[in-house]
Image (cartoon, grey):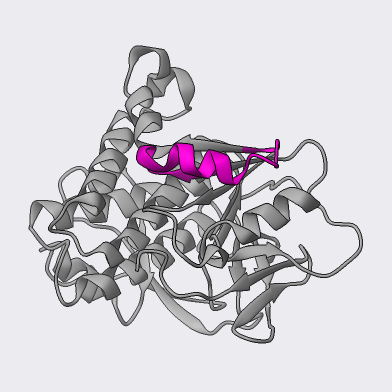
Amino acid sequence: MDVHYTWIGPPPTDRQRDIDEPKRLAARVGTGVKIYFWCLDAQVAAYTRDFAAHPNVTVRGMQAFLAGASKTAYRWYYWYKESDDWAVAAMTDILNWGLALATPPSYRAFVKDAWSLFLMYTWGGYVLDAGVGPHGGGAFALPEPTAFMSPSLTQDDALMMRRFTLSRLTGWQAQGDVTLNDTRADEVCEAMHYGAADDGESEMCPQLEVWMLASPRYSKGAWAALKQYCVVWKEMQQNNELVSANAPQVFRYLIAGSVYNGLTHGNNGAVPRTSLWFCQNGQNGTVEVPTLKLRKTYHGSSAH
């Protein structure tokens, strides 16, 4: 099974923000778990040195991986289950946009969100923010995921989502539903120049988080989440709305809605409780996942 971390940019001065937790996890996981640390190609050598004492960590360059995925030996039809050539191109566009001089560095957090969904479908396993690592003593193990999964800050329903179809977007009718925060669906659609969101069904769910995701490779849930994120991003790109005063909030609603779409895919609009890790607040700006003995430490956006 594979575990993925990602850092987009040069190593920070405070190594708690990028490598301390991955190192702790590498020292705790048992055999059979391989950790991939994804970074920009220019930082591969530096991060390889950082993880030299951890043979179960492999450092990979994001740009080199995407370039390889577009070549004949890695054609999407051969490597993956869907006909998804466009998704490689979309992820390449998203990464290039995030690195462009005109894009605020803080927006790289949204690039990482897209990359997490991309890895969940194409690779599978666990995707963890750099601030997520093991805590507590005793035996530690990460179970093999059997469905697309995410953390939840509540066990009770606390968030209203809207499920609808982008009926006025050419070609979307055959692609499936979109799910977004009910009070913000129009805001996301406005950023797409779509107009007001179509009418749809409102659904309640627990308070979802996206700093950790898990999925078996090729799961339909991961595909539904990735597809929604990339389609909305592409529409925003075509309408020159990727950088604006409202864009950061739009991206935050988009990743949460995309994850919800993946969680509920094929389950009649409900989140299976077995697809959620229920969390509890820890100390000093942390959230703990007791069932996995993992803890998330909030350091702020990795892009700053």
Query: On the picture, is 271 further left or further right than 279?
Result: left
Q: Residue furthest top?
A: 72
Residue 119 % position (x, y): 49, 42
Q: Which residue corresponds to the image point at 29% horizontal and 46% vertical from the top-left?
A: 95
Give the position of the C terminus as an image quadrant: bottom left
Instruction: Find the residue positioned furthest to the right.
Output: 138
Which of the pair 133/281 is nearer the observer? 133
> Residue 22: percent from the left, percent from the top?
63, 54
Magenta highlight on residue 50: yes
Q: Quadrant of residue 240?
A: bottom left
Question: In terms of depth relative to the viewer, which is nearer, 132 or 83?
Answer: 132
Q: Is residue 176 visible?
A: no
Q: Nearer the viewer, residue 79 or 267?
A: 79
Residue 176, image x, y percentages: 35, 49
Please state the horizontal and vertical placement of residue 31, each as a whole percent of the image.
82, 38
Give me the residue at 80% from left, 53% from top.
Answer: 28
Circle count: 0
Residue 71 visible? The answer is yes
Task: Please tell me whether residue 149 is drawn above or below residue 297 in the rendered image.
Answer: above
Please tell me which residue is depicted at 62% across the width and 60% down the height of the picture: 20
Range shown magenta: 37-57
Lateral position of residue 159 relative to residue 57, left or right = left
- Give the image quarter of residue 24: bottom right
The answer to if 48 sits in the magenta stretch is yes
Q: Nearer the viewer, residue 80 or 221?
A: 80
304 lies above or below 262: below
Q: Which quadrant would the N terminus be assigned to in this image?
A: top right
* Residue drawn at (29%, 78%) of the image: 184
